[in-house]
Every structure is written in C-alpha cells, then in structure tokens.
Image: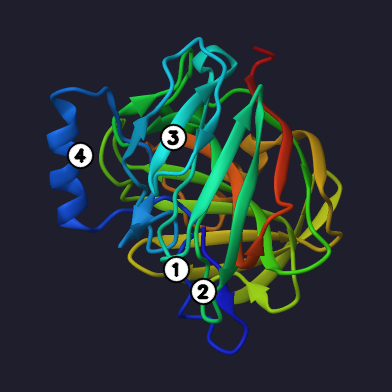
Amino acid sequence: MFATNVDDGTRRRAGRHRRRSTTRGDALRALAGGLALVALAALTGTGPAAAPVPAAVASTTPVGERAGKVCEKFGSTPVEGGRYEVQNSLWGSDKPQCVVAFDTGFSVEAKHSNDSGPASYPSIVFGCNYGNCTKGTPFPRPIADLGDLRSSWATTTPSSGDYNVAYDIWLDPTARKDGRPTGLELMIWLKHTDRVQPIGKKTGETTLGGVPYEVWLGKADLPTISYVRKEQTNEVKDLDITAFVTDAKNRGQAKEGWYLTSIQAGFEPWIGGDGLKTTSYSVTRDGQ
C-alpha cells in the first residue's frame, strides 16, 4: 500500500507490511525458539506495500481463541478461527498504535502526525504472508486459476485526519509463502482524504463492476498498480477481485504464470488513526 503526499508522488511508502530491518529479522529468529512466529507482511523498511515489503508478524493469540488488542509494532492475531489475521504493521512512525481485533474486524487506536507518508497499515489478511498462511486459504494460487474471487468489506472512518482505505493484493512469480513478494502490488482504494494519493502517477481510467476507477502506476522497490475509486465509499459487497487482477494483466503489470499470495484490507493513516475501523471482512473463492 502506498500513499504519497500530493506534492511528491514518488515519496510514498507502501501501506503494505514490509520489513527491511535486519535487526527485526534477528529479533524474530530469537522469538522462534519459544513463540509461533507468524511472518505477516509488515513492510518495514519497513513493511506494507509501503516500501513494498510485508512485515513478519508474531501471532499473539492462538488460533481459535477470541482475538484482543495487539500493540506490538508488527504483531498480529488470528480471528474467525484463524481464517483471517489482523495485523498492526506500524512501520512508518515512532508513535504508539494498537489494533483491537474482533470477529472479522478491528479498530485502530493511534494519534499519528506524519506529513510526508503513511505511518502504518493496520489490516486484516487472507492468504500467505511472510511464512504465515491463514486457515483454509486457497493461496498461493496461479492467477490463471483464481476462479470467482470476491471480497466484501465494511468500514467506518473519522471526520478528521488523513488516511486511505485500501485493499493490498500481492502477486509473485512463484508460489511464495514466505519472504517479500517480488512481482506486483495491486491496490484498490475505496476512500481517501484529499492530500493522500497513490504512489506514481495517474495513467488512465477504467470501469470494473460498473464502478469507475482511476488507474495509477508507480514503483518504490516493487511495481505498484492502484485502482482509485472515483465514487468513494466505506463499504463494498462481492467486489470482483479477479476482475482487477485480469485488468492488471491486460495492462502488462501482472504476468502469466504468476501467483496471488494474499488479499489484505486496511488503512494507511498519516494524521490521526482513531476512528478507523473494519466492521466486517470476507473473501470467498467460487462461493467458499
């Protein structure tokens, strides 16, 4: 996930979970002896599409238990019996941030004050990310065999602050389950405040599912294509994810033989953060 200051479209650091820090990697290896390491994209270098590097996350709640509050910078916790994973992914700020996970959603607790880029990408994930695969996920899966892939997502957003509300979908040339994806970051922006925009520049427009989108292309350390909804919304139902991947392939951004590794939905707060909330989230393939 990337977001940039409108004055500098190249500065934005993806909202995806990316990690570049070697010290973080050392810390995770140390945890491996006693904790179940769950590598979930928290781009550091961060982590989220933001410098496109998903972050490795340590699961704080056993699968099957009700999730709670996660305040570790790259901590995460499973929800709905492990079908999804909520991750904090605080990669672009030194200010504290927590996510409170429940059922198939989460709320954000933060008071960020970034002027030049996203502070974080708190999100809910379906798929494989940095070695952690959510329960029952069909990913990684060849993009030629995605089937009828759909997602519904409902959010609430505050009246103040700067942020975007966006899906972050990762594509890789291999059936990658660990490490940072190396193919393409595909974002679908549902809503954003005025000064927050995708990385790169607008290259065209398209209509998918009867809804018009701007198409932006950019690159940090990974190519990114962003579909920015022209009619902003806090909720989508049965969004046709396959249609976006197909459009990206037709534009030469996604390649034949690549794999989709995860579908993430979350927020990139710049200013504020309190009041950002996912009230429900689901992903299905061929109805399941």
Query: Is residue 264 visible to the viewer in this orientation of the structure?
Result: no
Question: Percent x, y for residue 280?
Answer: 73, 30
Residue 174 placement (x, y as % from top left):
29, 36
Q: CA distance from mark 4 to mark 3?
A: 13 Å
Q: Amino acid at mark 3?
A: Ser
| Local crowd size for mark 1, using a 10 Å CA cut-off: few (<14), some (14–19), many (≥20) | many
Residue on which the image places disc 2:
117
Q: Closer to the observer: label 2 or label 1?
A: 2
- The x, y position of residue 189, in whole percent, is 68, 56
140 is higher (above) or lower (below) than 115: above
Q: Is residue 91 above or below residue 265?
A: below
Q: Residues within 10 Å of mark 3 (few under 14, many from 20)?
A: many
User: What is the C-alpha distance between the residues marked 2 and 4?
Assistant: 26 Å
Read off the residue under disc 1.
13
Rounded to the nearest angstrom, the CA distance separating label 1 from label 3 is 21 Å
- Disc 1 and disc 3 in contact, CB within 8 angstroms: no
Residue 196 appears left or right of 27 = right
Q: Which residue is mark 3?
A: 76
In the displayed structure image, the side of residue 162 where residue 208 appears, left or right: right
Amino acid marked by disc 2: Gly
- Spatial CA distance of label 1 from label 4 is 23 Å
**Between discs 4 and 3, the one toward the N terminus:** 4
Mark 4 sits on what residue? 28
Kindly identify the amino acid type of the residue bearing the numbered disc 1.
Arg
Residue contact at pointers 2 and 1, CB within 8 angstroms: yes
Estimate the spatial distance between the alpha carbons at disc 3 and disc 2, rounded to whole Å.
22 Å
The residue that appears at 48% across and 73% down in the rendered structure is 12
